[in-house]
Image (cartoon, helix red, strand yellow):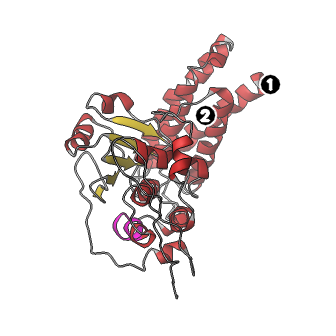
Amino acid sequence: MNFTPRHLVLVLALAACHGRQVLEATPGVELDGTAYEAAGQVLLQERPALDHEDLHNVFKLSPSIISGGEPDSEEAFERIASWGVKTILSVDGKAPLVEAAAQLGMRYVHVPIQYNGITEDELLRMAKTFRELPGPFYVHCFHGKHRGPAAAAVGRLVLDHASREQVLGEMRQWMGTSPAYEGLYATIASTGMPEIAQSETCDWNFTPSVGVAGMKEAMVMATRAFDNLNALKSNSWVVDPTHPDLVPEQEALRLAEIFRRSQKGDDMRARPADFRARYEALVPAAEELAALVSRARTGDGPALEKAAGLMSRIEGSCKACHQRWRN
């Protein structure tokens, strides 16, 4: 494959962001083939992850940007704080542990993204975060292998002014972002990064945790989780190599989180008591499903059968609710 990048021109622009001078982001590059293939054009020296017992897939990409897995313990947050991190950017769907970070002087920003690429609005929010909030930044998804590295690459482009070839290489060669997620690679390779003027005028307050806004949004998100779980169920809960970041335990816990958070809205309080009771029971059921699929993936035959049955009961409960109360 002949890969000839467009001449990379940095347009100098000055903007006051906490006393820093920032530049416009590097333009995109021409692709002759896939973006994943382009990620192999610049060969990087091998760099192992800085794994710890409480934090995985950690890569210090620059003094400003660290990419890694989700911190979910006090020890993990303490470790991140010890690196001088001031802002944590999560692109996972799960609600981040905002208070745990705040207790150590770190601020959370939540911009959940999908696996098929990063939207224009998501890019704008990320660019604004990197340009206007204090660093260093710790960027994470769940495992720190796919969506998180793509978001970290945005920071490398708009804050560090690294080349597209360099950051694509980091995603593929260091962090192991799967070729199944060509959309993430394509965003970093070719999509124009928001200009400084765009991020400055963006009316957004760095949301620390994207919640579930009412029953309608909860049902949309739950449907996606059910689709993912059914696909995993049909494969005996084995992770599909073409979608390596789709893990059954995570999807079951995501479903529990959707049900839990959507109970807090005004529209839920206005529902009949028997509806609320049925809905609330879905949270422990989804958590139990997470435990069962974890055991099933270790070859536990009875757990495999129980997980399938519980999945059917959860879906049946949802369908019964729809038939009785949907309007």
* Quadrant placement of the C terminus: top right
Q: What secondary structure is the magenta-colored segment mainly?
A: helix
Q: Secondary structure at mark 2?
A: helix
Is 178 displayed left or right of 85 in the figure?
A: right
Q: Position of residue 173 (x, y in %)?
A: 36, 71
What residue would you read off at disc 2? 314
* Residue 197 left/right relative to 71: right
Q: Secondary structure at mark 1?
A: loop
Between disc 1 and disc 2, the foreground one is 1
The circle on residue 248 is none
Residue lying farthest bottom?
A: 2
Q: Residue at x 34, y 52 (%)?
A: 68
Q: Is residue 172 magenta?
A: yes
**Residue occupying image coordinates x 23% and y 57%:** 50
Pointer 1 with pointer 2, Cβ within 8 A = no
Inspect the image, locate mark 1, and give the three-letter code of the amino acid beneath it. Asn
What residue appears at the point 55 percent right and 53 percent down from the top-left corner? 232
Q: Amino acid at mark 2?
A: Ile
Using a 10 Å C-alpha cutoff, classify the residue at mark 1 as few (fewer than 14 neighbours), some (14 to 19) or many (20 or more).
Answer: few
In the rendered image of this protein, does residue 258 appear above or below residue 122? above
The segment highlighted magenta reads: 169-176
Residue 253 against residue 123 in the figure, above or below: above
Q: Does residue 153 appear to the left or right of 119 in the view shown?
A: left
Mark 2 closeness class: few <14, some 14–19, many ≥20 residues within 10 Å: some
Q: CA distance from mark 1 to mark 2?
A: 20 Å
Q: Is residue 303 visible?
A: no
Residue 4 image position (x, y, % from top left): 51, 83
Residue that label 1 marks: 327
Q: Nearer the viewer, residue 301 or 5?
A: 5
